[in-house]
Amino acid sequence: MNTFFLRSSMALSAAALLAPAMAQTTGAGTTAPITEPAAAPAAPAADFEPGQRGRVDIGAGFSSLTGGNSNWNDEYVRGYVGLKPGTVLNWDLASQRHFDQRGTVGALSLTHTLSPWWYMSVGASSGSADFQNKYRGDIAIYRKWTESQQWVTGLSLMKSASRDGIHRDTGITASVAYYSTNDWVGEGGVVYNKSNPGSVEGYRGFAALTMGREKQHYFTARIDHGKEGYLPTGAIANGVGNQVGFQSTELSLQWRQWLGKDWGYLVGGQFYRNPYYNRKGLSAAVFFDF
């Protein structure tokens, strides 16, 4: 059997935009608009690049919002570290000012290889502001397919609760990814979410593409569209509609460029819209491999 080993750095780079970041959660909604994609628990646990155990990103983001909402400011440090072959720890710590509130949010997730064909991830996050979740937990299982193991399917479960003590969310995500031998990764999936109170159900679809090579550069694009349950706590809607069960779209672009053997920069752009406001954002970071 010809086993296709996924580079941990390639997988993590792709995963950063393939699923909503655990750390960037809102108080009441099916998905969390993000200003900078974080390392998400969608990456296969894989053998590390020779001489490399992890990575650290240090950066900031700014977003302008319409509809009378205040602008966003974010500062963050995040990364991953290999605890041992087949086990990766992702971590994220961010200070965010959204909707005229300042909060700190932290997240941890662990991705572990179970066998040559299976791997799983578990994660948790918590924030201090009203627009962040009081807690969020994720668990996911992934399966590699075909002799080359280039196809990967995933199924994940998410539960969260907001700090207002009222809003709660449960979500299920089904995804499929293809890891090409020509330096690109494609992924698509569907997210089902139930928001309470009111049992507001919603579906979202997402697609992402990452192109590039380790120690050179990566370009990643991600788009998702579908139904959200509630607006984030603190958002201004100007009385448009009932503010429950609305459609939204988000597009994210990211470029990671190595300037030396073990460091470089990361830039990104984001656009999000719903019936009540639009958001445009830019982010920048430096990163270090170790």
Image (tube, rainbow, N blue to C red):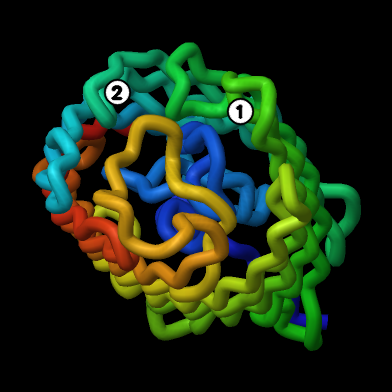
| Element under disc 2 | strand
Q: Residue 220's x, y, as percent? A: 31, 67
User: Residue at horizontal 75%, vertical 40%?
Assistant: 159
Q: Which mark is residue 175?
A: none
Q: Is residue 83 left or right of residue 274?
A: right
Q: Residue 188's x, y, as percent? A: 56, 79
Q: Is residue 183 above or below residue 232?
A: below
Which residue position is annotated with label 1?
A: 162
Q: Is residue 136 left or right of residue 270?
A: right
Which residue position is annotated with label 2?
A: 96
User: Residue at horizontal 76%, vertical 48%?
Assistant: 170
Q: Is residue 171 above or below residue 52?
A: below
Nearest the eye: 60 or 277: 277
Can the viewer see residue 85? no
Can the viewer see residue 200? yes
Q: Look at label 2 and name its amino acid.
A: Gln
Local crowd at mark 2 within 10 Å, few (<14), some, or many (≥20)?
many
Q: Residue 214's x, y, as percent? A: 33, 57
Q: Residue 247's x, y, as percent? A: 45, 71
Q: CA distance from mark 2 to mark 1?
A: 16 Å
Q: Look at label 1 and name its amino acid.
A: Ser
Tell me which numbered mark, 2 or 1, is placed earlier along the sequence: 2
Q: Quadrant of the C terminus?
A: top left
Q: Quadrant of residue 194?
A: bottom right
Q: Quadrant of the N terminus?
A: bottom right
For the residues carrying marks 2 and 1, which lies nearer the camera in this image?
1
Q: Is residue 171 left or right of residue 32?
A: right
Nearest the eye: 275 or 172: 275
| Element under disc 1 | strand
Q: Marks 1 and 2: in contact by CB < 8 Å?
A: no
Nearest the eye: 4 or 275: 275
